[in-house]
Image (cartoon, rainbow, N blue to C red):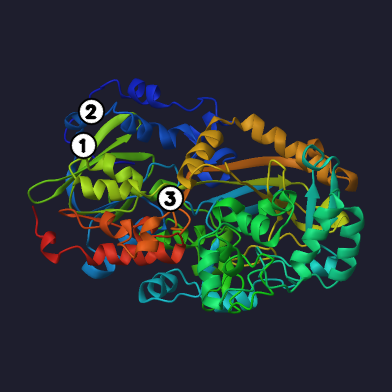
Amino acid sequence: MSDVVKKKSSSIGMDRTIGMACDIPRVDRTDQKAELTSHYPPALTGMRGSGYERAYCAGHALRNGHLTENFQTATEVDQTYDLVVVGGGISGLSAAWFYRRKYGHEARILVLDNHDDFGGHAKRNEFTYEGDTRIANGGAFNLYTPQTKAQKLIFDACDIDVDKLARTTITRQFYEKMGMGQSVFFDSKTFGRDVLLQDPAPWSDFTFLYDPTTPVDAETRWGHFMRSAPLPERVKKDIFRLYHEEKDYLPDLSSDEKLKKLALMSYRDYLLEVVGCDPMVCTYLGDRSFGSGRGLDATTALAAHQRFGFPGFSGLGLPSEKGRKHPGEEYYFPEGNATIARMLVRDMVPDSLPSAGLSNAMVTRVNYDVLDMEKNTIRIRLNATVINVKNQENSVRITYIRDGKLFAANAKSCVLACWFHVIPYLCPDMSDEQRDALHYNVHTPNLWGNVWLKDWKAFQKAGTCLMNAPGSYYASIILEPPVSVGGYQHSASPDQPAHVSFLRGYGAPGLPIKDQFRAGRIDMYETSFETYERELRLQFNAALGPYGFDAARDILGITINRWGHGYSYWYSPLYDDFLNKGAEPPHLRARKKFGRITIANTDSGGTDSTALAIDMAWRAVNEIDSAERVQP
């Protein structure tokens, strides 16, 4: 349901205009009819994320200059909103919630989003087989104990107690008790033969879900690794000494000098030039930083030590802040951070999620038909791509495309909770300085997929629940996390259905990091679903076939979440010279209030996290002048 309009919309050839702008292959999903007719987007398989035509075509048309002459032909809706939020991700939904909290439940708010589902990168995927529904995250997933007032308000509204959930809903050592743990898959194309081995090294990802992080049989694993890994002897010895040798590779430097040096060199250079490793060591470890969207050449040696806990630093005498450090507990909902988005929508839109709080929220479906009803004080309008946001004398005019037609809404204020790089196209009358600062942020491409399996017996037989795959098409293979919450039970037995997540990394060593991101985005969008599916089936059969896996028999469905503009750009001394000069970060200039328009989203915080998305929404709403609420 959408707004009543003052006059009937006229055709302006918008379908043809948008279609011409889709410079990505048109056949990019398994079931386009299902996408157009579904009233429950989380259950769709095939190409998802932001990588399906309906989500990106209008935006590309605007980027390519095909829509700029059509703004004045938009049909105006018949009411003025107190607030229009552009972007229905966690930051946008939080902005709507904060605005209502500040100005009252009578505030009229419209949230516009170009996707067929809300949540931004925090999307829910699900699949049902013979009455058993498996759910998974399609994007953002990590949560931490809230640290700010804004975060605590949102978590309380969502009935989320991170510390309690971490204590009571994760089945600790679930896979370890079944003889399963982290493994490494060597593919024949890269290493000469297909071999799946138990990984002897400490884990650096998902450590709170797949404990213990250091294998209890590490010594036995190392022995098997040294005998059986399809690597030259020198490479195996280099890997072994990285994890075992406590040598100071920078003996002539003080601790502070070491930290400065490590901050200005890549981990790849550190391994090759300082530690003296064979280049194939970088190939072996290369997949382990792709969770951040950057390869070893684009990850500083300091981040490798402090953020990822990578090997090679134990003898340097550095401060003992190894691995990711966050205050409080870390948590992972089965549907990822979509739980925050769904619970916020439940709180703001009556009857949208008829659950009794968090207790049964995982197994309750959102009713998408009620999100945009005229009676709602907060309306969420999906499949609506905003193409222009313009300050007027006493209001803001927001123009958007929906179902191939142009509409315009007026608001007293507007929060842009969308990507930085989109905003200069939406607001072409911004100053050059602000537009340049907005363009500084180039997002990381990120592909996160879920494959739905009849059972996971082959995983148990192989002894793996988390697989690193250096050189393979998919860098990481992750069996369903052992979390039961909100009425949902994780797969408890290998003969039950389960989902497996997989990650593809993108890197082009030698290119500047932003060009690497652009090249990865092109690669991602030029790749067909059929290619993603074929590579997945081949890789699973190669790694798990010897343990009884048969892709033709065991795979029930595949969901590919393409996030061409995935992680927000985070600064690095390797590429961002202002850090070394002590200059002002670009995001502070980029997020300045512009008339009645304020800016949220993680981009405006200079890095990427769900907590930051919430904090930036709080800031953006508090930048709105109460005087703007006077009726235009």
Q: Residues within 10 Å of mark 1 (few under 14, many from 20)?
A: some
- Residue 511 location (% of width, % of height): 52, 42
Check if mark 2's residue and mark 1's residue have beta carbons within 8 Å: yes
Q: Earlier in the sequence, mark 3 or mark 1?
A: 1
Image coords of residue 351 (percent x, y): 41, 57
32 lies above or below 242? above
> In the rendered image, which residue does mark 3 sit on?
118
Image location of residue 537, percent across then percent down? 75, 37
Residue 14 vs residue 443, the one in the foreground:
443
Residue 233 shown left or right of residue 162 in the figure: right
> How far apart are the two marked residues, 2 and 1, measured between alpha carbons?
8 Å
- What residue is drawn where x is 51% and y is 76%? 256
Rendered image quadrant of residue 314: bottom right
> Under tag 1, what secondary structure?
loop
Residue indicated by mark 1:
5
Secondary element type, mark 2: loop
Is residue 5 rendered to the left or right of residue 372?
left
Q: CA distance from mark 3 to mark 1?
A: 24 Å
* Coordinates of residue 249 in the picture (x, y in percent): 67, 68
Query: Quick check: 556 above or below 138?
Result: above
Q: Which mark is residue 9?
A: 2
Among the 4 quarters of the image, the one containing residue 467: bottom right
> Which residue type does callout 3 highlight?
Phe
Label 1 is placed on what type of residue? Val
Q: Residues within 10 Å of mark 2 (few under 14, many from 20)?
A: some
| Secondary structure beneath label 3 | loop
